[in-house]
Amino acid sequence: MQNFPGVGVSPGRIVGTIRQMPRPLAEPPTGDKLAPGTSAEEAADALRVAAKAVQSQLRERAAGASADAKAVLEATALMATDPMLIKASIKLINAGSSAERAVWEAAEAVAAMLVNLGGYMAERATDVLDVRARIVASLRGVPAPGIPSSATPFILIAEDLAPADTATLDPVKVIALVTAGGGPQSHTAIIARSLGLPAVVAAAGVDQLADGTEVYVDGAAGTIATEPGDSERAAALAWAANASTLAVFDGHGTTADGHLVPLLANVGGAKDAVKAAAAGAQGVGLLRTEFCFLERETEPTIDEQVKAYRGVFDAFPGKKVVVRTLDAGADKPLPFLTDASEPNPALGVRGYRTDMSSPGVLERQLAAIAQAADGATAEVWVMAPMISTPDEAARFASLCAAAGLKTPGVMVEVPSAAVTSESILGQVEFASLGTNDLTQYTMAADRQLGPLAALNNPWQPAVLQLVRLTVAGALAEGSGKPVGVCGEAAADPALAVVLVGLGVSTLSMTARSLAAVGAVLATVTLKEAQEIATLALRATSPAEARDRARGKLPILAELGL
Amino acid sequence: MSERKATVASSSGLHARPASLFAEAAGETGVEVTIAMDGAPADDAMDASSILSLMTLGAEHGSVVVLRAEGEGADAALDTLVKLLETDLDAV
């Protein structure tokens, strides 16, 4: 295996055979004189005709090119008849040089000038040399240099690519671009990115490879290797799958057999919400309202709150947005709500409990949510964090009702809520599992303590059992109230499958994970997810639970997840 | 000899696309127009209809350049070109 390190400019992994760009035209010999019997005027005229012809070829290509490529080609077309280039050439012709040699030298001088300017200009020097080669080819009556034609797709290798080459290349035929020269701002890079082709530039030596050589190209790592082996082929296959499935979430969370599992986003404010909507989120499963006010010393006014919530609702017209009331305390202190002197804040007055110590804040927040919901088309649900008992759930529901909010719910983070979910759901309309805190409280392991990280693992079978119990309680309650998950666990595609198998009806996660979770979920039926969940539940350690689930999900390895 | 000063408005300076639009427009005026950086000797002025000259001029966003032309139509040509220079051609 031979390796050619370069600079990766457009990601993608691919295995294919190469085709070299034709060698550049042979240079007209130094001192090449006007042919006997040819006058300087005739040579100058021939040059003008050739320049015009090249210009019209390039304009023709520009007309059929994409917007990016078009601008570049139009500029290159102008260069062909550029007065500076033509005048300098004619001066040389008048001094006795052949037209070919004259334009060669004149363009060389211009290119050198651009190279000296450095940066962007230096990379435009390629355009000048491309125009020169075309003019010389035209003067000689030979076909212009260009991309080789091939019946099968290939990886194009070149010294460097000019816009005229890259702009017209067919991405069905050319599957990757590799250049021995060029830089990260070269046309090769620009065009490769706009076409989504893997590309590596500045890979010295690749232009010596023979046509038909099989190579592996990694456009992210910036490497080319000959004689690709199994691992390179696997990486290329994983990329091919990734590229088509992991790029975007289609906005439809479902199992392979059509069991719908809406995939929602966790957001901290309007900005996040707009991004999440663009990423295809089917709604918001967790609006962390405390994130709108983390820097605040004092309680935000109702107007400020309405504005903050409304921004989120407006990002999801007609969709579900689950608002969690202020979850202050422990790792997220809010000076106007929390008591910093508690010896054990994770077990202290936090979440819904702050309503005891700071009465009125929750009612005002509910009023603000109701006001923001009024006039927005989003379907607004509201839930309280850190609910431990059915009494708390009942009181929260009554506060919501008083504020005119129709869909009250609770977070299930405290094990007592999981165990008594049947009674709790008798009081509210839905439950959402907060797997991060549920894990911390189930395992009695502070989330913020590094040495306890192994205990703080949502794959802990005990945590999975509490998820199962929460769902079982909802079923026992009898009116089909939904149980969702809005913790980090939902963003792990393997764990997401387990959660769906345990009967969770929606998954809410960071918007970045939507596509991966959606892609994996779509490969299993609900029955398979249930079987995988059972395997995980019966494991004796988080590692075993995870391995068992992953073992049944070959898609993970294929996608490189 | 007519002369005008203009400030380059294109965000990328007189490069690539703005340069080609300007060079084309300068060519279409039918008048020989030169361009130089403000303060450079008039002898160093370059052909405004040459995209290569424009690129080697090195005018960035905010650079002040001097346009010169002579004869019939010179003023009208310069006015047109000044307007173009003071437009952000990257945004067109």
Image: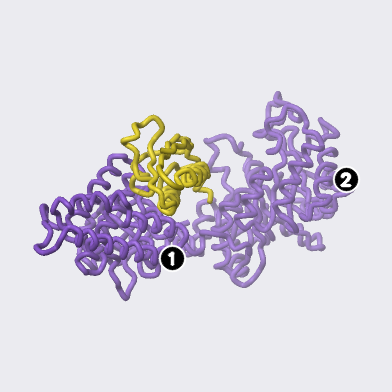
Chain colours: A purple, B yellow
Q: Hey, which quadrant is residue B3 in on the image?
A: top left
Categorize mark 2 by other alpha carbons within 10 Å: few (<14), some (14-19), many (20+). some
Q: Which mark is residue A63?
A: 1
Decide if residue A1 is in sight here.
no
**Residue appearing at x 77%, y 37% in the figure:** A304
In the image, farthest residue toward the right:
A402
Q: Which of A309/A513 is in front? A: A309
The three-letter amino acid code for the residue at tag 2 is Ala
In the image, farthest residue toward the front:
B72
Say whether residue A433 is left or right of residue A87.
right
The three-letter amino acid code for the residue at tag 1 is Ala
**Residue appearing at x 54%, y 58% in the figure:** A516
Which of the image's four quarters has the N terminus of chain A? Answer: bottom left
Dot 2 falls on which chain? A
Q: Give SS at disc 1.
A: helix
Q: Earlier in the sequence, mark 1 or mark 2?
A: 1
Q: Which of A438/A192 is in front? A: A192
> Which residue corresponds to mark 2?
A403
Q: Are marks 1 and 2 on the same chain?
A: yes
